Image (cartoon, coloured by chain):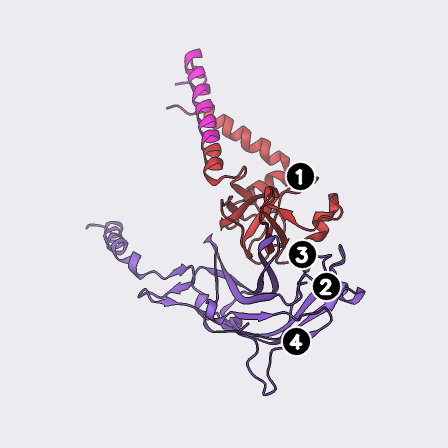
């Protein structure tokens, strides 16, 4: 049978199938976000500042704990003015007795020589600690190299178009 | 049972039943050997030999790289530490991050913990940690850094802690038992140095 001679009904059915797949993927992602209590439960490491523990392209699994952060935890935090969050280790922790801010944290990348004061002060001069609100999540585990595809897609946008095009073609031309 | 694949399949099915109890697991406080015995790091010791409260100065700022603010007082420690972390190096261990932390309580801040020294061990040959007369790598300053009297006579606890990072999977951290932690008191005034080693070269601070 000629694969191009599909009826309108079948074409609409295929489109609907694709939409169901996309929306269920979204639902799973949002569900995972809710379960881990963080907006980005899975992130990719972009820099070498945490070598040798995490290298470029490693996938990190995050969750935001309800208890306090401990010294030695690896956290992902987002600073105002920086679009990309940073993955570094917590060096110092100071817990407050009361108030909105629960903890003051000082972080440092394993591969860096000094703590992150320079990073904090880039857009907020005089900032010496991060607070728990700026922390996206704590790293609970990781998978090596899996995220390299994301980095490749960022460096070569043509790859994104090619992949999406291939996926779209595959979705439209397969038959149940 | 007529071909190689079905024979291999049957062997693997038996292996499935046997593996769970025979695989070493990287546990929270160390590792378990194949027989389920907990192997914690051996020969753990941490002795703080002296503590000094250093007044704010350009030299102190440069030493501890605190270019972004000028704390009124820095605490400088000297310590010896040993740890045999070889048992943490199992099949899935990528690196061990060992650190010495100092914990104390202060008015308004019930828990404070500062990492003063750290090291990364990537293979089992370097896993026998032995440092003597080490100084703290990172600045020991309080969050209320403008208060010069913050550290006067403060009781602190120094601990050796470690985190095991795996090739794939979860990260696990643990600390030395409390009885081995070094508990001592910082000098009473800024500019003073207290030596915890007795005249006879004793083991250093381990009691308040």
Q: Are marks 3 and 2 in contact (CB under 8 Å)?
A: no
Q: Residues within 10 Å of mark 1 (few under 14, many from 20)?
A: few
Query: What residue does disc 3 label?
Result: A115
Foreground label between 1 and 3:
3
Residue A149, x across and y down, in percent? 55, 42
Foreground label between 2 and 1:
2
Do badges 3 and 4 share one subunit? no
Query: Is A99 in the magenta?
Result: no
Query: What residue does disc 2 label?
Result: B73
Which contiguous range is marked in magenta?
A1-27
Q: Secondary structure at mark 2?
A: strand
Quarter of the C terminus of chain A within the rendering: top left
Nearer to the camera, B182 or B160: B182
Q: Which mark is residue A83?
A: 1
Do badges 4 and 1 share one subunit? no
Of marks 4 and 2, which one's residue comes earlier in the chain? 2
Question: Chain coloured red: which letter?
Answer: A
Q: Secondary structure at mark 1?
A: loop
Task: Tell me how far mark 2 sits from mark 1, CA to CA.
Answer: 35 Å
Task: Tell me how far mark 1 sits from mark 3, CA to CA.
Answer: 20 Å
Query: What residue does disc 4 label?
Result: B194
Q: Residues within 10 Å of mark 2 (few under 14, many from 20)?
A: many
Do badges 3 and 2 share one subunit? no
> What colour has chain B?
purple
Task: Tell me how far mark 4 sits from mark 1, CA to CA.
Answer: 47 Å
Output the chain of dot 1.
A
Task: Tell me how far mark 3 sits from mark 2, CA to CA.
Answer: 18 Å
Give left or right: position of B139 versus B109.
Answer: right
Quarter of the N terminus of chain A within the rendering: top left
Q: Secondary structure at mark 3?
A: loop
Q: Quadrant of residue A71?
A: bottom right
């Amino acid at each position: 049978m000629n694969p191009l001679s599909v009826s309108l009904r079948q074409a609409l059915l295929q489109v609907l199938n694709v939409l169901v797949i996309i929306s269920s993927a979204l639902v799973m992602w949002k569900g995972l976000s809710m379960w881990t209590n963080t907006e980005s439960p899975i992130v990719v490491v972009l820099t070498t500042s945490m070598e040798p523990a995490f290298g470029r392209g490693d996938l990190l699994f995050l969750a935001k704990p309800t208890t306090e952060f401990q010294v030695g935890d690896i956290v992902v935090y987002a600073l105002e003015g920086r679009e990309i969050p940073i993955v570094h280790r917590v060096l110092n922790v100071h817990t407050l007795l009361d108030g909105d801010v629960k903890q003051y944290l000082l972080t440092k990348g394993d591969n860096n020589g000094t703590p992150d004061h320079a990073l904090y002060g880039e857009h907020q001069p005089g900032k010496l600690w991060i607070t728990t609100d700026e922390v996206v999540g704590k790293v609970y585990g990781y998978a090596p190299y899996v995220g390299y595809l994301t980095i490749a897609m960022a460096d070569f946008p043509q790859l994104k178009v090619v992949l999406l095009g291939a996926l779209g073609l595959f979705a439209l031309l397969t038959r149940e | 049972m007529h071909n190689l694949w079905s024979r291999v399949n049957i062997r693997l099915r038996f292996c499935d039943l046997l593996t769970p109890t025979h695989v070493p697991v990287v546990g929270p406080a160390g590792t378990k050997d194949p027989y389920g015995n907990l192997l914690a790091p051996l020969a753990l010791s941490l002795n703080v030999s002296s503590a000094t409260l250093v007044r704010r100065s350009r030299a102190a700022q440069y030493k501890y790289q605190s270019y972004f603010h000028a704390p009124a007082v820095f605490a400088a420690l000297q310590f010896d530490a040993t740890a045999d972390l070889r048992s943490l190096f199992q099949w899935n261990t990528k690196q061990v991050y060992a650190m010495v932390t100092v914990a104390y309580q202060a008015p308004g801040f019930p828990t404070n913990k500062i990492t003063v020294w750290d090291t990364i061990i990537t293979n089992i040959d370097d896993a026998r940690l032995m440092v003597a007369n080490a100084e703290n790598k990172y600045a020991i300053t309080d969050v209320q850094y403008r208060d010069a009297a913050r550290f006067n006579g403060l009781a602190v606890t120094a601990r050796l802690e470690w985190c095991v990072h795996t090739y794939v999977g979860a990260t696990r951290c643990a600390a030395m038992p409390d009885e081995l932690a070094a508990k001592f008191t910082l000098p009473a005034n800024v500019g003073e140095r207290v030596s915890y080693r007795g005249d006879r070269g004793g083991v250093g601070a381990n009691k308040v």
